[in-house]
Amino acid sequence: MYEFRLPDLGEGIHEGEILEWHVAPGDAVREDDPLVDIETDKAAVTIPSPRAGRLVSIGAAVGEVATVGGVIAVIDDGTARESAPAPEGISLPAVQEEEKPETVTRREATVWGPVTATPATRRLARELKVDISRVPPMGPGGRVTAEDVARYAGGDGRPVRDVEPSTGAVPAVGGTGSGIPFFELEPLPDFEQWGPVEKTPLRSIRRRVARKMTTSMVMVPHVAHMDEADVTGLEAFRRRERDRSKGGAGLRLTLLPFVLKAVAEGLKGAPALNASLDPFREELIFKKYYHIGIAVDTDKGLMVPVIRDTDRRSVREIAHEIERLVGEARSGSVAVGDLRGGTFSVTNLGPLGGTGAIPTINYPEVAILAMGRVHEKPVVRDGQIVVRAILPLTLAFDHRVIDGADAARFVSALVNRLSDPLTLLLDA
């Protein structure tokens, strides 16, 4: 018998959702034949059978989450019972190394069992003077997360009391379930009592988006500043360039690369908008590079690939990067490295319609710009009513880091750049 454990999928990935089993218990399997499809927060991967034989049992059904190192299949290969990881080479496409969780024994192993946590989480525990062996694990697969450590510390070093590990319920810290006065999560009602429903598991990317957006909205005090840019001249220039390149090797020149270029230039004069706040060390981190993320709508959920060194690229180079990253994100082939390291994000809702939106900050960034739909609008210029192409802009920002005046100055400078293509060209 051979116990097949879920191999290390790389890139700090600790779990995956079972999408499909290619064989069922009792079926014969050949070595290297497709065994199971697993989807993680990054991508889907097919894992081959490590041995030939007969599948005796599976450790996780379709829709369930399997953790790295856990037994996902038992194969009768005619040998004595053996337990080992899968052969080397099972990995997600285009991944990079990242710190992996370490497992040690808890002091009260009869209560909690082993401690699984990343080195960064252990570092945080040391800084907060928290005994990680006593922290209740609320992360996926029984992992202790940084949030668990911070929750346990409770702001004054007091532990969380009466935690029920089997349910993952978080009991009182200083009197309330969340540590926030009057904030309690109530269970949902049974919606089926009013009519038919359909239930779908929260999968991979969508689950990751839900976690990140919740973190952002709970942690960050959002404020929004709105303005409009007259992009009549910029739109005329863009259309001329688009028409001029028709029939050639076809670069799809939209308004977005111009906005990204203007944003990157503007961030140089507004360093607070390109920063992050470390709430544990109570310090601001000002980044000296400008990697702009773009929100991409995909079949599996929102993804934010990053255009690195946007300030050093031409508008044409930025346009090429947008095409590449959007295509790869929607096909599921985007490299994990292209989803990391952003310092500021832009979401373009214009193609979908609407007059504007207040976006959610892509934590741990501190600001995000939303573009609305360009529309013709009568405005007054030099005492005359004229029709101009107007682009609505909304800047959502973290009020812990950025004051309203700073946001207003940044947006005003952005509006000026977009309203005058020559200014944008000179800045670039």
Image (tube, rainbow, N blue to C red):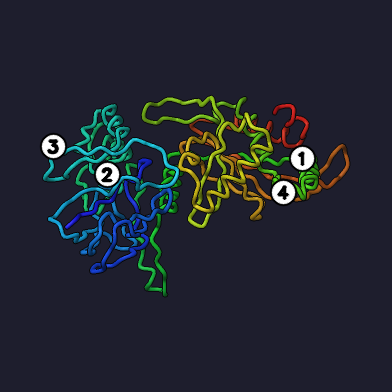
Which structural element holds mark 1? helix
> How packed is label 3: few (under 14 Cα within 10 Å), some, or many (20 or more)?
some
The CA span between labels 4 and 1 is 11 Å
Residue bearing the label numbered 4: 374
The residue located at (35%, 56%) in the rendering is 17
**Which of disc 2 and disc 1 is earlier in sequence?**
2
Q: Dividing the image into 4 quarters, which one contains the C terminus?
A: top right
Q: Which labelled disc corresponds to residue 143?
A: 2
The CA span between labels 2 and 4 is 46 Å
**Which of disc 4 and disc 2 is earlier in sequence?**
2
The residue located at (28%, 51%) in the rendering is 6
Residue bearing the label numbered 1: 234
The residue located at (56%, 30%) in the rendering is 290
> How packed is label 2: few (under 14 Cα within 10 Å), some, or many (20 or more)?
many
Residue bearing the label numbered 3: 107
Which structural element holds mark 2? loop
Q: Quadrant of residue 233?
A: top right
